[in-house]
Structures are given as structure tokens and as C-alpha cells.
Image (cartoon, rainbow, N blue to C red):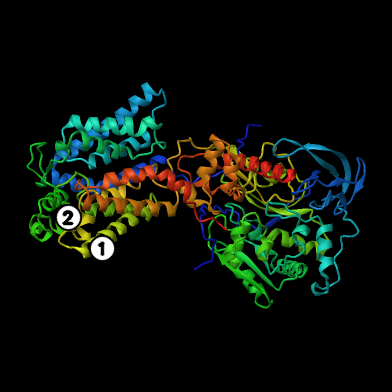
Amino acid sequence: MLKSFKIGGVHPPENKYTAGCAIQVLPTPDKVIIPLSQHIGAPATAIVQKGDKVKAGQVIATAGGFVSANVHSSVSGTVLDVAPVKDAAGLLKPAITIQVEGEEWADEVVKTTKNIDEFEKEEIIKAISDAGIVGMGGATFPTHVKLSPPPGSKAEYLIINGVECEPYLTADHRLMLEKTNEIIAGIKLVMKAIGVNKAIIGIENNKPDAIAKMQAATTTTMGIDVCPLKVRYPQGGEKQLIKATIGRSVPSGALPIAVGAVVQNIGTIYAVYEAVMLRKPLVERVVTVTGESLKNPGNFLCKVGTPISKLIEAAGGLPEDTGKVIGGGPMMGRTMINIDSPVMKGTSGVLILPESKSARGEMHPCIKCAKCVSACPMGLEPYLLATITEMTGDLERLEKEKIMDCIECGCCMYTCPANRPLLDYIRLGKGRTGAMIRNRSQKK
Amino acid sequence: MKQLYVAPSPHVHGSDTVSKNMYGVLIALIPAFICSVIFFGVSSLIVTLTSVIACVLFEYLIQKFLLKQKPSVCDGSAILTGVLLAFNVPSNLPIWIIMIGALVAIGIGKMTFGGLGSNIFNPALVGRVFLLISFPVQMTTWPKPMGFDTSYVDAETGATALSILKEGLMGGKSISELQASLPQVNDMLLGNMGGSLGEVAALALILGLVWMLIKRIITWHIPVSIIATVFIFSGILYLCNPEQYICPVFHLLSGGLLLGAIFMATDYVTSPMTKKGMLIYGVGIGLLTVIIRDFGAFPEGMSFAILIMNAVTPLINRYCKPERFA
């Protein structure tokens, strides 16, 4: 029996068209737009001005608080502007625009002569913090914060998220195949950073080549195990993955460290390797560009700040029948209206859905079939949360019904035969309930 | 550039629809319907068609002219109510009575609450119980299974297994004295006995259950908990006094038990939302059915048991929460 999380989940068509496409390097564009807020937490503060010359890998904005991350230039050139630029949703967000000139790297970006074993814990975390690494699976939580557990808590396991349970996406899959040794090195570094001697790499069973490759690479390493997992969405949800790999349940409202686990995504681990061993900050990432109608879907290594439209061009151009452009996967990704917005640290994929698959189906009344309840991986009652939000807006009741536990995976809406916008309502209710809880704790 | 669609996630849908589920249940009812036509003849067909047409028509008229809504009869729920109502009445029931039943089922049982998804009670059972109380003679005059027959209404009539049992016990006879007049187990499995037109063929109904489980239209919780409860509870009574209480197998195969457990109690709208709730609901239906059958004045208790538990469902939903992640 393959391991899995225990309750709920769905199995959407996998559509991993690009699983066999090796990572291609996307040529550096003429201009990059680097947003100051590519992570959860405070935006970074710009330290360059219009007209400044910058080199690739140079810090151009520093972390704006404890939960924040440095931002680096991904190219060498001249700062065109430090001003708000429209993001994917069309909203103005502070960013630094750089005209690309040449291909010069900052002096500090040099390969280290040290061995993995020679690094100290603090040195690794500082390198990660300096490099501006954030969770690259999409959540974009600053990694150095995640690797510094609060006092009193102790990590036991490092869990590596190689699940990639979102349909269509293959960036992590390709990284595992093509950068196997680098990833193992990255895992060792993070293990050292958090002081654990056990690491588990969770990989869904639809990637047998990646499982085999990682298993072969870990036979000689002590303490790193590969754990093949059942193909079931959301296997890569943080709490689900912890449940599947080590059988522990993260309590409601708690962080993974409460059960001794730290979870890191494959892309993040690769970035850690580069940051520590090559002294190279997070300025590029692998992005899967895919969709049924695309001519040349593929996995591209591109500079942070590259306009999404350049990626789409490289994949054969925007198809005639395009209906939706999604940043991320189909279950949790966000739709874009501005495809000239830049690739960010958390952009794991660009999915182009044809018009025929873009519109939502006709909505019907809820028939209480309970399929959303069966599908919810958190054991909630999506129909109830949506109904309370829609009808009464009773936030206390929503809190009691555990709305804050919702991970917004979308299983309920995926499975609903009546096409109800369950997650839309739940997000709304969750937002209001969260605000109420914050207000209440401020008053106390 | 052309306009792009913008919406929150998820951006894909599992292609399940309300009508797929409704038509799935209808497909599951086909074997029982075929058996019914074989045993009760063309009158089964006439009753079922009348009931379906009346239900669909009443729903259409109410939505169009009373509620001024866009009619949604294509979703298959009115057809399903029609078929289930027909399955719960004798096959020689006069057509005008069936139409009254359809009007009550759709009009009172479903549309007064706000239509599909909002009703508290199973509409087909509301219609059925209304008819049982209003037309007790016609509703308890069952045709004997005569093999395929093209005539309507004038068939020879007889009692159901449960009413033979109830009258016999009320008349002071013991079960061993009644045994000869009760149907044999193999006839009960196939449906070769008196009863409502869709309830008699046990094997055909179980085939429908298997289909619905495979197609994931329903889960096992409700039918299995009802059947297990009836079996265990009636089994205990049987072991206490086999002359007074009939054996559990007879309970399972007689009357509307299987039709109710598989098709009526599992109605999405009126049954609980969580697995635990479904089990409580099923156990409740099973207990009530055996209590009504063995201790009550009515020979049959399935419809009442389901309706009573329908009323308890909101309470069950309120207190039975799913197994939380942590």
C-alpha cells in the first residue's frame, strides 16, 4: 500500500504533458520587472535608484522586517525605474525595472571551496537569508524564518515536498531528474541547518523515474529516505504531506514544527544548494509553461522578472483559443489579466486553458449530496461553511465550524455536482473570520 | 488583446453534475422496474409512466406559473420522484389517485420548501403516505403477481407478506401456523409476491445498489446500516420468541425495506451529510421500522421510519461533524 493522507482528496486528470521535456534555459529578456513583494510578509525596501548600474545577483532591495526576504537583481544593467508596475491581477505593486546590459555577475557570486560538512548551522541559515530564498512551491514563505524554529520547539524530520500534486506542473519533477545530486546536497545542508538526522522525500507515484533516481542517489546517504506516495490531490499540501510521510497530524492552527516537522519544496532545496554552495541568490527558477493548445509546452529556467509573455512566446505563443492564463496549477493557481507581469520567486507554472475549459459550469441548487464533505482533506463541511457565509455571515459559527482550517485546495468545488462556488464563499468567510479573530486578540 | 477569463481557483471541475446523479439512480432502478413489469404486467408500466409524467408536469407548471422560475425539470429529479412514487404504490392503483399522489409529492413535498435541495422530507414518500392515509383501501389492495399481463386494474388481488403476517398475529395465530400462507424465500428474492410495484424484487434492488456504489452515486453507509440494524434487532426479537416475531430474513425481503434502504433513505437532500450522521440515520430507520412492524398497528413501517428520520436529519447534521484532520 502506498502511503497517503487519510481523509478526503480528489484525483483530477494529471495532464503532465511536459514531464518528458528537459529544462531549457530561456534567453535573458531586454528588460526585467522585479517586484519588491514576492513573498509573504513585509515588502522589501529598495536600495537602488533610477539610473544605478546593477549586476546580476546584487541585492537591490533588503528585507523589510523579520518575515520578509531580500530581493536581488536577476540581470546586469541599468535601473530604469523604482515605481509601481501592474502585477498579474492588474494591480499596481512596487517594483524595480531594469534594462538588461551585458551579463555580468556580482563579485560575491562565486563557488565556495568548502565542503558541505564544513558549514556551520548559522552560516547556512545566513546564506539562505542573504539569498532571499522563499518557499518556491507557491506559498512563498521566507525560508530562513521557517528554518529558525521558535524557542522550545525541536525539529525531528525534514520533509521534502517532491509531490507536485497540482495537475499539469512538472518543474519539480524535472529538477529531481536533472539536478539530483544538487538536491541531495541541498537536503543535507537544510538538515544541518535545522539539526535533524532524518529527511524524507515525498514523491507521488506518477513520477516513477524521479522516485528511482532519488532512491539511487540516496542509497549511500544516511538518514535520507524516499517515500513514494499515492497519486491523490492535495498530497503536497503541507499538513497532508506530513500525515502521509510520518503519520503525524498537525493540530488545528498550529505549524508543522508542532509535530517536529519542517517541510521544504524541491525548488526551494535547489535554491538552497545554489545559495550556499555557489553563493548564488534566488534570481532564477524553473517554470512549467503548459496547456492543451500550446505548440511547445515545456519547462523553462528563467530569470526572476522575465515577463510571462516571453515564456509564452518560447512555448509557441498564446494560442488562438486561449480563455485563461493561470499562474500556478489549475487547482490553486491564480488567473492573470496582465501577461506582461513578471515571473516571481513563487511562479511554479504558467497554465493556459482553452476557452472551452475556462468558463465555470451552470450553477444549480445544493442537493446535499455530501460529496464536498467526503472530498475535504481537512474534514470540514464545505457546503455548510459556504451556506453560513452566504446566508447569515455568522462569523462565530464559522469559527466553531473550523473555517480557519481550510487550506483552499479546491477539492470541494472540484467535486460539486451542482457547480456551486463553494470555495469563493469559504474564502470570503475565512477572510472575515480571520479579521474578527485578530480584532478580538487585539482588544485583549 | 482579447479578454481573458478571471476567476478564483479551482480552474478545473470534476465533470460530475446533478443530472448525472439523478439519471444514475434511474438506471439503478431499471432492473427492479423490469421485474415489476414481468410480475404485474403492463399495469406497472402504466402506473409508472403516469406518475413520472404527472410529477414532471406539476413541477414544470409550478415553476413556470406559480414561482415564475426557469423550469428545471431536465435535471431528472422530478422523473426520479415520479418513479419512486410509482414504485411505492400497488400496480392497480387508479390513475387519478396516482396523479393526486404526484401533486402532493411535488407540490407539497418538494416545491413548497423551495424546490430541489430545500425539501426536508422525501417527496415521493410524502406523496405515498398522503395516499396511504387518504385512500387506505386502494393503497392496500395489491394485485397478485400473475406473470406478464396486458390488462390493467382487473387483476386478482391479494395481501402482502407483511399484512398476512400482521393480520394473522392480530388474529391470535402463531408464526408456525401462518408459515404456509407466507411467500417462500426464493419467491421473495425474485419478487414473485404481492406488494407495491417496485418493492418486491429483492435481487433486482440489490443489483441497483451495487451499480450506485460502483458509480459512487451513494456510499454504503445508509443502506448497510439500515439492513444491519433491521437484521440484528429483528434477530434478537426472533430469538426471544420465534412464535411472535418473524425471522430477520423475512423482514429484509418483505415490504419496502430494500427499496427504502437503497433508494428512498439514500435521497441526497433528506439524508445526513457526514458518514457518522448517515450511520445514526440508518440505525434509526432500522430500529423504527422493526418497532412499527413488530409492535405497531401498521404492517409496514419503512415509509414512516424514513420520514421520521428525515425530520431528525437537520439535528443530526448539527451535531455530527466529520472526522476533522486533527
Vertical position of residue A323 compared to residue A287: above or below = above
Q: Position of residue A130 (x, y in %)?
A: 84, 58
Please name the residue shown 60% across and 42% down the image: A396
Instruction: Please indicate whether residue A76 sits to the left or right of residue B241 in the image.
Output: right
Please name the residue shown 53% across and 57% down the image: A232
The amino acid type of the residue labelled 1 equals Ile
- For the question of whether residue A54 can be seen, the reply is yes
Vertical position of residue A75 compared to residue A111: above or below = above
- Report which quarter residue B33 is drawn in: top left
- Label 1 belongs to which residue? B236
Q: Position of residue A149 (x, y in %)?
A: 75, 62
Name the foreground residue: A87 vs A391.
A391
Q: Which residue is outermost to the top?
A: B65
Q: Are marks 2 and 1 on the same chain?
A: yes
Instruction: Please indicate whether residue A406 sits to the left or right of residue B172 in the image.
Output: right
- Label 2 belongs to which residue? B188
Indicate the secondary structure of the residue bearing disc 2. Answer: helix
Q: Residues within 10 Å of mark 1 (few under 14, many from 20)?
A: some
Q: Which label was assigned to residue B156? A: none
Instruction: Please indicate whether residue B15 sits to the left or right of residue A426 in the image.
Output: left
Q: Position of residue A384 (x, y in %)?
A: 51, 43
The amino acid type of the residue labelled 2 equals Met
Vertical position of residue A363 compared to residue A290: above or below = above
Q: CA distance from mark 2 to mark 1?
A: 22 Å
Q: Residues within 10 Å of mark 2 (few under 14, many from 20)?
A: many
Which of the marked residues, 2 or 1, is nearer the chain's N terminus? 2
